[in-house]
Amino acid sequence: MNSSKTYKITAVVPRFSTKILGGAEKHAYDVLKAFPANCKITLLTSTAIDYVSWKNYFKPGNEIYERFTIERFQNLRVRNIKKFNELSEYIYKKFPDQTSDDEKNWLEAQGPYCPNLLKRIDEIKDETDLFIFFSYLYYPILNGIKLVPSKSILVPMFHDEPPIYLSQYKHIYNDSLFYAFNTPEERNLFEKVFHFKPTKQAIIGTYIKEIEVNKPIPKNTKLSENSKPKILLTIGRMDLGKGIYELVQNFQNWISTSNENCELHLIGANPPKLVSKFASKNIRFLGSLSDIDKFKAIANADLLINPSSVESFSIVIMEAWSQGIPILVNAKSEVLVGHCKRSNGGLWYSDEESFTNTLNYMIRNKKLLEKLGLNGKKYINSNFTQEIIQDKWQKLLEIYLS
């Protein structure tokens, strides 16, 4: 890269707000923030903040936030999640005999449906040096890449989920694109589903910003140690598809027969009724928290559990490891198990029986928890600091912008 030249980079992400504390949105924000100072960054996004309905929340138009110019475009079709789920079920049952019109209708119904965002990409494609698209799934991403394939980097965040097998993705996500994967497991999934190994690819991930918090100093008495409950923490979207229902069920069954003094704390907005009914003295729903309060909750936890089977990276387990907190993850996620194996910073479960056995083993072994947490912290420091991720993106940008 020529340090004396200004490069125009346009990022496309389905929704964007600093109120969104995880997922593709936080990933995009953290990555773009670390780009060199001579990169002029424009971020194209919808006016939505809620990914379930894509209801318009912000006003369409432009704003300056930190070093970014954010351009927001109205979503023209608020999503009825019940009808969309019915449409999805219809498509998946019909697979592989669904038509291109079936898939087009499904993509538009999924949203956010922002045709003017696509028009904006077309308007600025000649003056833009590079487009970066975050998250493979959505209407603005798939259709946006169609317009600028030779200038695009896709940060796909692939999950092993039904939509990835639809034909429309295989037509567009071909070997002309550059792919920035989060993990080796995500790349392996891509190769398995799309049946080729991308010529242009990198495994990057994102960095974890540490926030210093003070842990309470426990009183040095056996009584206080025994009376203080161990805190198991989970953080993330309260989606049934993210394994939350199975987690609270498994924990409720475990705690009802266990002599352990433990509580499960869940951070995330709007738990479904099916999940929130489990609220009790042992299962607490904390709602959405600020970054500092979230990090305080992590620091005070004994163990972080990620029950999701659909992850491409998982920022929350990295945030736990950054504070030396061990993790327990769903074995159905090859990404999460891969992190655990590479770091030796956590264990995994595959069903209720292994959840019970593994949790008992971890909770009753304080030295094991400390060792796993320490290993996880070393893994972060060796792979996911801001300096390391910044250097990886710098090298990738030099390929395109030199």
Image (cartoon, rainbow, N blue to C red):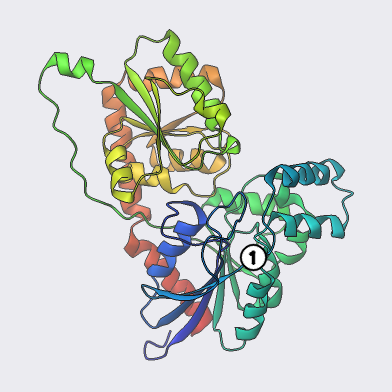
Q: Up-down: is 45 above or below 366?
A: below
Residue 307 screen position, x and y as percent: 51, 33
- Res. 324 in view: no
Q: Up-down: is 320 above or below 258?
A: below
Horizontal side, residue 23 vs residue 267: left or right: right
Question: In the rendered image, which quarter is residue 343 located in?
Answer: top left
Q: How many marks?
A: 1
Residue 306 screen position, x and y as percent: 47, 36
Judging depth in this view, the residue of 44 and 92 nearest the camera is 44
In this figure, which residue is indicated by the disc labeled 1? 141
Q: Up-down: is 275 above or below 121?
A: above
Q: Residue at x 54, y 49 (%)?
A: 312
Residue at the far bottom in the pictured view: 4
Q: Residue at x 37, y 54 (%)?
A: 383
Question: In the rendered image, which quarter is residue 73 located in?
Answer: bottom right
Q: Residue at x 66, y 67 (%)?
A: 114
Q: Residue at x 31, y 46 (%)?
A: 322
The local crowd at label 1, few if under 14, some if 14 to 19, many if 20 or more residues have their Cα within 10 Å, is many
Residue 166 screen position, x and y as percent: 77, 53
Residue 96 screen position, x and y as percent: 86, 48
- Name the amino acid, label 1: Ile
Judging depth in this view, the residue of 301 and 239 nearest the camera is 239
Horizontal side, residue 286 vs residue 137: left or right: left
- Res. 319 in view: yes
Horizontal side, residue 129 vs residue 113: left or right: left
| Quadrant holding the N terminus | bottom left
**Mark 1: which secondary structure?**
helix
